[in-house]
Amino acid sequence: MEIIAQRVFNPLYIYLDIGFLAVLCVLLALKKKYLTLVWGIFGGALYMVVDYGIFHLLTHSRSIEGGDLFWVLLWMSMSYGITNFVWIWLWFAKDKHLVEWSLLIVIWWIAAPLLANTFGQNLTPIKIQRTTGSYHGYMALILIAGYAIAIGYNLFQKDKTKRFPLLWMLAIGVLVQFAWEFSLLIGGIRSAEIADWGQKLTTLIVNSLLETNLGAVPIFCIYALVTAKLTETFKRRDVPVKFTERIAELNALRVKDR
């Protein structure tokens, strides 16, 4: 069955969300989470390359009604690119304020469409959607390649402390996308004009299992490699460590101990 990722939303939602992104970036800067902030902006740019460059220009799977495709995709890419990448980074860091950052993002995702619908009632909604049949197989290939490499590494790594935290990575990869998809669904944005609840739930489940999760292993590796040498303020660590040693450090961390 073709999976249609559709969103129907009030244009006010865009402006409210841009304001939220500005607040989030300022908070990260004030807390000196510079590395996290830069990673989030990179995530937004990467989402734009994928969404506009691949989904639109290459596969022609994107369509829009009521708005300009480029500018709407730029906002969407920066919005979910920044929030998703920042949130994943904070999860891998087991940040001491992980609960606060998580609630900030999730509560906003739930509240934003409700605010837009209430205070922008007279605005013409925007509908944007993409079909996924032409590329989900490629995404699945990236997913299985990443986890296969991580599983293979763990099978031959004798030191348990230096093995990839596979269940932690899987949980984060699924949770971040699920929170986003579920918030869109209950906010009346995701699959708004699709009456079949079976199709709505299929989109929710498949996207949650696949679309962010395919980057869980690569992002964890990038996080471990970068933070093995640098701090959040881009200063070199007093004692840089190797990649596998950084994995051991991360495995030893607990959120409650930070």
Image (cartoon, grey):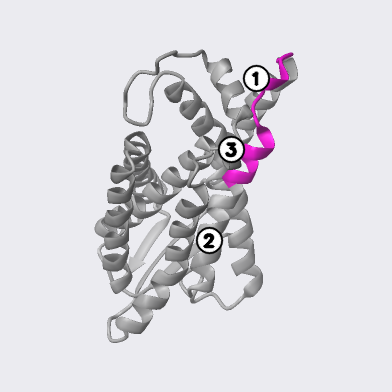
Taking the image as drawn, is residue 8 in sight? no
Q: Which residue lies furthest to the bottom in this view?
A: 122
User: 59 or 44, which is in the foreground?
Assistant: 44
| Residues rendered magenta in the picture | 157-173
Disc number lying in front (3 or 2): 3
* Neighbours of disc 1 within 10 Å: few (<14), some (14-19), many (20+): many
Disc number lying in front (1 or 3): 3
Give the amino acid type for the residue marked by disc 2 in the picture. Answer: Glu
**Residue 33 falls in which quadrant of the image?**
top left
Taking the image as drawn, is residue 91 in sight? yes
User: Residue beneath label 2, please?
Assistant: 181
**Residue 75 position within the rendered picture, expressed as x and y whole percent measured from the top left:** 30, 56
Does the magenta run of residues contain 141?
no
Does the magenta run of residues contain 169?
yes
**Residue 91 position within the rendered picture, expressed as x and y whole percent measured from the top left:** 53, 42
Earlier residue among tags 3 and 2: 2
- Res. 257 mark: 3
Residue at 53% over, 31% down:
220
Q: How many labels does the image show?
A: 3
User: Residue beneath label 1, please?
Assistant: 162
Q: Is residue 164 left or right of residue 30?
A: right
Earlier residue among tags 1 and 2: 1
Residue at 64% over, 41% down:
170
3D distance between C-alphas at marks 1 and 2: 33 Å
* Neighbours of disc 2 within 10 Å: few (<14), some (14-19), many (20+): many
Give the amino acid type for the residue marked by disc 3 in the picture. Answer: Asp
**Residue 229 falls in which quadrant of the image?**
top left
Give the amino acid type for the residue marked by disc 1 in the picture. Answer: Lys
Determine whether the residue tagged by mark 1 lies in a helix, strand or loop: helix
